[in-house]
Image (cartoon, grey):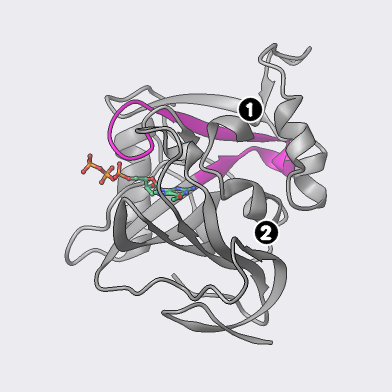
Amino acid sequence: MLVNLGVVEVDATEVTSGSANSGLSWSHIDKTQLYTNGFIFNENSTKVLLGLKKRGLGCGFYNGFGGKVNPGETPADAALRELQEEAGISSNLAHAGTLLFTSAADPKLHHIEIYRGDDWSGEITESEEMRPEWFRVPSYARSGVIPTSAIKEWSDVPGEDGLRTVPFGQMWADDRFWFHLLVAKRPFIGRVDFGEPLVKGDLNSAPLLKWWFGEVNGKGADG
Ligand SMILES: COc1nc(N)nc2c1ncn2[C@H]1C[C@H](O)[C@@H](COP(=O)(O)OP(=O)(O)OP(=O)(O)O)O1
């Protein structure tokens, strides 16, 4: 089906959607900032490399490695550069999805091109911006949207493999909607309009005003 996400019309099948109030429209967009975000998986996608953001946007959250696309760069070039700068490694990255966000705190559209890599070269290294850590991908992160019960029951204690499971409670609130599509290599697109954070300065307390996530039909969204 064709879906209008306010700034783009896409052919995609809905995975999840919602709205704080019925009839709420997407917020108006004046400006756009383009970002990348890259996630490295091991063979079989049983482990994912995330980084703890140490400064700036999303400080204190775990995320893939990425940042702003510089003038003259393609998103794919920027994704490789950011992975090198933030984690010290390179990878054969493939485009995986597209995310569009606004927030009450910053009405500029955040357009994020998501990449995934199934290999890496170089030594995984902590940077000024990110502290890398491998996490186990739990079975519920393969089957669908991450249930809130799994987020509440998450344990900080590493399993027998020495790894903690993916900490969705310490990630951007939207990640639980699309992470299973990233794991399954199913191209996705989504948009969220966030409201004011309920706790000042705590980005993860920002309520979701309106959201839509879907699997891209056909060849997929091209980054
Ligand atoms: C709003 O929801 C978001 N969800 C997810 N999963 N990721 C997000 C969200 N908003 C932003 N991001 C990502 C996009 C980028 O990968 C980083 C932010 O990048 P940053 O602002 O740190 O960009 P840099 O160019 O690295 O920054 P410097 O100028 O400080 O070097 O978060």
Q: Nearer the viewer, residue 27 or 49?
A: 27
Give SS at disc 2. Answer: loop
Q: Which residues are magenta?
A: 39-58
Q: Amino acid at mark 2?
A: Lys
Of the 4 image quadrants, the one containing the N terminus is bottom right
Asked if ligand 1 lies within 8 A of label 2, the reply is no
Quote the CA–CA distance across marks 1 and 2. Answer: 18 Å
User: Quadrant location of residue 101?
Assistant: bottom left
Q: Where residue 3 appears, x then y in whole percent? A: 60, 83
Q: Is residue 62 left or right of residue 77?
A: right
Residue 71 placement, left or right of 136: left
Q: Secondary structure at mark 1?
A: strand
Residue 173 within the magenta-colored segment of the rendering: no
Which residue is rendered at x = 71% and y = 51% of the image? 180
Marks 1 and 2, the one that precedes in the sequence: 1
Of all residues, the one furthest to the bottom in this rendering is: 2
Residue picked out by circle 1 = 135
On residue 206, the disc is none
Q: Residue shown at 46%/73% (left/top)?
A: 26
Residue located at (49% from left, 52% from top): 92
Mark 2 and mark 1 in contact (Cβ < 8 Å)? no
User: Where residue 55 appears, x then y in whole percent?
Assistant: 29, 29
Q: Quadrant of residue 201?
A: top left
Q: According to the image, label 2 marks what residue?
A: 185
